[in-house]
Image: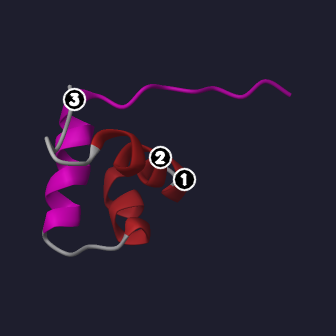
């Protein structure tokens, strides 16, 4: 079984950040963006911090 992975676009990363800033849960964000909750979790862990969203 071959699995297909696709990187998040910059726009998706911005959407994730904006939705989290509005108070959405990771589950809500994942449904809106159309990616798995794990993807959202990894993105937030990887690209949030003092400087915010990285490109």
Residue 13 versus residue 18 in the image, above or below:
above
Asked if marks 1 and 2 touch (Cβ < 8 Å), the reply is yes
* Residue 42 circle label: 2
Name the residue carrying label 3. 10
The quarter in which the C terminus is drawn is top left
- Judge left or right: residue 52 versus residue 38: left
Q: Residue at 33% x, 51% y: name it.
A: 33
In the image, the segment drawn in magenta is 1-21
SS for tag 1? helix
SS for tag 2? helix
Closer to us: 44 or 33: 44
Q: Position of residue 49 (x, y in %)?
A: 24, 48
The quarter in which the N terminus is drawn is top right
Spatial distance from mark 1 to mark 2, Cα to Cα? 6 Å
Spatial distance from mark 1 to mark 3, Cα to Cα? 18 Å
Q: Position of residue 44 (x, y in %)?
A: 35, 50
Q: Position of residue 53 (x, y in %)?
A: 18, 40
Earlier-in-chain disc, 1 versus 3: 3
SS for tag 3? helix
Q: Residue at 16% x, 44% y: name it.
A: 52
Instruction: Tell me the mark number nearer the camera, choosing from 1 and 2.
Output: 2
Sort mark 2 into few (<14), some (14-19) or many (20+) by Cα contacts within 10 Å.
few
Closer to us: 32 or 45: 45
Earlier-in-chain disc, 3 versus 2: 3
């Amino acid at each position: 079984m071959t699995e297909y992975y696709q990187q998040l676009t910059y726009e998706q990363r911005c959407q994730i950040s904006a939705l989290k800033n509005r108070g959405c849960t990771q589950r809500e964000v994942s449904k809106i963006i159309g990616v798995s909750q794990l993807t959202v979790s990894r993105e937030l862990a990887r690209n949030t911090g003092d400087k915010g969203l990285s490109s």
